[in-house]
Image (cartoon, rainbow, N blue to C red):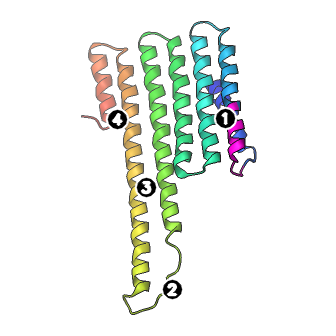
Amino acid sequence: MKKSLAMLALAVSFALSGQAQALTKDEYKVQKDRIEADYKASRNKCSAMQGNAKDVCQAEAKGNEKITKAELEQQYKPSARNEQKVRDAKADATYDVAKERCDDQTGNAKDVCVKEAKAAHTSAKADAKVTRANEDAAAGKAGTTAPATGTTGATGSTGRAASSVGSAATGGSTSVSEARKDAAEDKRDAQYKVAKEKCDALSGAAKDGCENQAKAQYGKK
């Protein structure tokens, strides 16, 4: 798993190498063609492999392509939406590789492996949503910091501007709070599924006790 994550990180490092300027259309096309060529080359290397090692290799190649394409789009057309797509691509790529590696196992060990991979994916996606909510809230506050210039009456334009600022700030805070709450719930549900899956390796009273403990730990009825 560590090796896979390291390979994914290496594949996307071009976006962190000081290319802060937005790309031109021609530069974008050159980069996109390079990414597709790199993907084909990586897939060709997988052809010499056999069994699950080949499947893992192909998943890594596809994951690298998804990440680099998402980062290219963000560099070409920077936006909060495209930045979110970058985070999602990283989470999806890591999950696809981890899930593929689970095929090296069998029985309950494989089932637990898949649930753990899914839990990690859920956690990464949840964290990405919280990050997006924080960014949106910060952008909203930045857009409401301009001082009011009108002074007409106690409840004139200045008062209305101040009210607008307060309303925007409150709305941003609520969004972040909700995102954090949803993220915590999603993570808890995913971890519960992992714990419950582990109980399937047991039977009888031991399995019942395991499941009851999992329910108590994660607040399930």
Q: Furthest-left residue in view?
A: 221
Residue beneath disc 2? 149
Front position among marks 4 and 2: 2
Among the 4 quarters of the image, the one containing residue 185 = top left
Q: Furthest-top residue in view?
A: 50
Q: Which amino acid does label 2 sit on?
A: Thr
Q: Which mark is residue 217?
A: 4
Q: What stretch is highlighted in magenta?
A: 20-33
Q: Residues within 10 Å of mark 4 (few under 14, many from 20)?
A: few
Q: Does the magenta stretch include residue 30?
A: yes
In the rendered image of this protein, does residue 159 appear above or below residue 212? below
Q: How far apart are marks 3 and 1 (CA)?
A: 34 Å
Q: Which amino acid does label 4 sit on?
A: Gln
Dot 1 falls on a residue whose secondary structure is helix
Mark closest to the chain's N terminus, 3 or 4: 3
Mark closest to the chain's N terminus, 1 or 2: 1
Q: Residue at x 75, y 47 (%)?
A: 18
Dot 2 falls on a residue whose secondary structure is loop
Front position among marks 1 and 4: 1
Q: How far apart are marks 4 and 2 (CA)?
A: 55 Å
Mark closest to the chain's N terminus, 4 or 2: 2
Mark closest to the chain's N terminus, 3 or 2: 2
Image coords of residue 88 (percent x, y): 52, 38
Instruction: Provide the major secondary structure of the magenta segment.
Output: helix
Q: Residue at x 59, y 39 (%)?
A: 70
Q: Furthest-bottom residue in view?
A: 153
Residue beneath disc 1? 32
